[in-house]
Amino acid sequence: MYPIVALGAYFIDKVWGEFDFVKHPVVVMGDYIKWYEKRFYQDSVYRGAILNLSLITLVALVIGLFLALLSSDILGLPSWMVLLISSLIASTTIASNMLYSSVKDIIKNPQNIQYLVSRDTQGLAQSDINKASIETYSENLSDGVIAPLFYLLLFGLEGAFVYKAINTLDSMVGYRTQRYEKFGKFSAFIDDIANYIPSRITALLIALLMYSPKALFGFYSYGKKHESPNAGHPISAMALALGIRLGGDTKYFGKLKSKPHFGEGRERLVSEDILKALSLQTRLDIFITLLLLGVIIL
């Protein structure tokens, strides 16, 4: 059942993307995080851990109850409808369509980079905007596509939604700032664990699907330089596959942060480099589709 739901979810996301007429589950999770932070915030690892575990528990319970009801005799739905509804719900955990569209949009609307990255974007040169776009696409292929599919295949709908809860927590409180250094520490740690395998799968897929031996054999040596145990690997794979350098010193929250470079080649990036990075998408779509079909048939 899980591979069928995963294939259906991926197809639905590719064709329709986000459903604007309903509140996205990630937004609901974000509302809970904001509510908890407003009421219970303390400069404490313990308070942050309670936030993390409470959201994960709530998400698992809600999805578990939903699935139990969906498959119950009370509704009496045929199996094909259960699969269709499950696929529709699961598609909200995948962001392939939105990621591709948002990054491609930067070519025409570079000012929109502010909505895609956490770094300071005011005053960024065009080359730095292009660099940020490619880094975002590479890293979020793991967070928004490969990781949710990975957990959907392993643990079903509950796994995909628990992963999204973990990822949302990290994106909202998992920063090393004065406010979140302790409060977000547990969330950042759990996110590192959850993304450990998917990030490396993503790097391998980038290298293989872009036919780059240099990326295949070199992404790890560059990726391990990143302060995150995961983010550097897909970024490095993309940089090596394209023959460019990503990373470097970057401003966050008004402070310049020293970061290593990833990859070899040009540092001055143009819009064509974004298009080259995005050219991976069609090959990735075909690969994921064939892989899931193969798992279903077998």
Image (cartoon, rainbow, N blue to C red):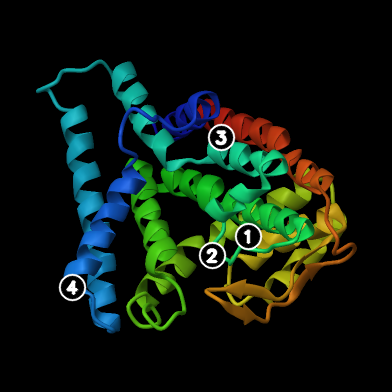
Proximity of marks 1 and 2: CB atoms separated by less than 8 Å: yes
Q: Which residue is mark 2?
A: 196
Sequence-first tag of 1 and 4: 4
Mark in the foreground, 2 or 3: 3
Mark in the foreground, 1 or 4: 4
Q: Which residue is mark 4?
A: 40
Tell me the distance, in whole angstroms, between the alpha carbons under discs 3 and 4.
36 Å
Q: Dot 2, how many residues are within 10 Å of its Cα: few (below 14), some (14-19), or many (20+)?
A: some
Proximity of marks 2 and 3: CB atoms separated by less than 8 Å: no
Classify residue 260 by image quadrant. bottom right
Tell me the distance, in whole angstroms, between the alpha carbons under discs 2 and 4.
30 Å
Q: Dot 1, how many residues are within 10 Å of its Cα: few (below 14), some (14-19), or many (20+)?
A: many
Q: Dot 3, how many residues are within 10 Å of its Cα: few (below 14), some (14-19), or many (20+)?
A: many
Tell me the distance, in whole angstroms, between the alpha carbons under discs 1 and 4.
36 Å
> Is 110 located above or below residue 250 in the figure?
above
**Front residue of 215 and 104:** 104
> Disc 4 residue type?
Phe
Q: Is residue 52 left or right of residue 268?
A: left
What residue is shown at x 57% (from left), y 58% (from top)? Answer: 117
Residue 120 screen position, x and y as percent: 58, 66
Q: Is residue 261 left or right of residue 294?
A: right
What residue is shown at x 24% (from left), y 43% (from top)? Answer: 63
Secondary structure, mark 2, is helix
Sequence-first tag of 2 and 3: 3
> Disc 1 residue type?
Arg
> Disc 3 residue type?
Asn
Residue farthest left in this picture: 74
